[in-house]
Image (tube, grey):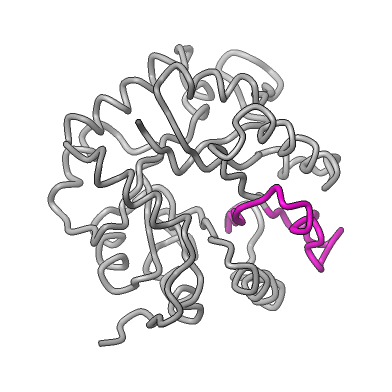
Amino acid sequence: MIADAHVHFGYFSRCGEPAPHYYSPRRIVGVLNRCGVGEFIVSSTCAQVKCIGIKDIVREAREMKRLAGSRAHVFFWLSGHLYDDDPEMKWIGTGLFDGIKLHERETPWVQKRRKDLEKILAVAEKHELPVMFHAGTTGWCHPSKLAKIANEHPRIRFDFAHCRPMNQMAKVVAECPNVWTDTAYITASEFQCLADYDWHGRLMFGTDLPVWQALEDISLTRRYMKYVNMLRSAELVDFANQSFFNFIQPLPRAGRACGDP
C-alpha cells in the first residue's frame, strides 16, 4: 500500500490544450486505485478560479469523499477570495475537510495578509487541522522562512511541500518537530539524494498528480507508477507511509517550537 500526501483535482493547464483541463475526483481516484494507493491527501485547484465559490468547493469535496471515503483526506485550498467570502471559515463545519492548503505565490498570506494568516492558523490549531504550505526556492516559499511560521505555531502540523531546496528542507525538518515535507514533483535524481539526509520520520511520499500533463503528453497512470517505483527503489515505502500517518494524527499535547532543546 502507498500513501500519497500531495494530490490535486480541479483545473490544470494541459499540454496542447488552449484552456485549463478539469480533472474530476473520479479521474484522480481512478489513477490512484490503479496504482495501489490507499490513503491520500488531496486539494482542489478550483479554489484558484475566481468565479468558483465555497459551495462549489464543498460540493466537489463531497464527491471525492463519496468515491474514496476515509481514504481521502481533503484539504481546503484557501485562496484569498474564498477567505474573504467566509473569514470565519464556516466550511470547516461541513466535516469534509481534514486540513488547509496555502500557496504563498497564489495568495501572499505572509507578505501582505499576515493578520488574516494568523486568524487562519488560529482556526487550524483550534480544530487540530494540519496545514500544507507550498515550498520552493525563493521568497517566503523558502523553507528557512516558512520555518518562522512553524516556530510561532508549534501545535500545528505543517507540510512544507515539494522538499526543495532539499538541503535546506532537511535542516528545517531537523530543527522543527512540527514540520513534515513531501516528494511532490521531485526528479529521479533528487529521489536518489533523499537517503543523504535524516528526515526524522517526517518525509512523506507525494506526487502532485496530475500536474505532469501540464508539460508533457503522457499517461498519468504510467508516470505515477514511475514515481512509485522510484520510492520503492529508494527503499522508502514503509518510512514514507509511517510519516504520512503521523502527519494526519494530532500532535501530543506537549510540544516544542523550532530550535528548542
Compared to residue 259, the image places residue 32 above or below, namely above
Rendering coords of residue 109 (x, y %): 64, 66
Residue lying at the far bottom in this picture: please name it: 261
Compared to residue 194, the image places residue 169 above or below, namely below
Residue 215 can be seen, yes or no: yes
Compared to residue 105, the image places residue 175 above or below, namely below
Rendering coords of residue 97 (x, y %): 67, 50
Compared to residue 148, the image places residue 227 above or below, namely above
Asked if the stretch drawn in magenta spans residue 101, the answer is: yes
Count of numbered labels shown in the rendering: 0
Q: Of 250 and 12, which appears nearest the observer? A: 250
* Residue depicted at x 49% and y 39%: 40
Q: Classify the position of the N terminus by image quarter.
A: top left
Rendering coords of residue 145 (x, y %): 43, 71
In the figure, is residue 202 to the left or right of 10?
left
Q: Of 172 and 164, which appears nearest the observer? A: 172
Asked if the stretch drawn in magenta spans residue 161, the answer is: no
* Residue depicted at x 61% and y 44%: 74
Residue 112 can be seen, yes or no: no
Q: Of 208 and 110, which appears nearest the observer? A: 208
* Residue depicted at x 45% and y 13%: 218
* Residue depicted at x 22% and y 40%: 236
Q: Quadrant of residue 50?
A: top right
Q: In which quarter of the image is residue 47?
A: top right
**Which segment is the magenta one?**
78-105
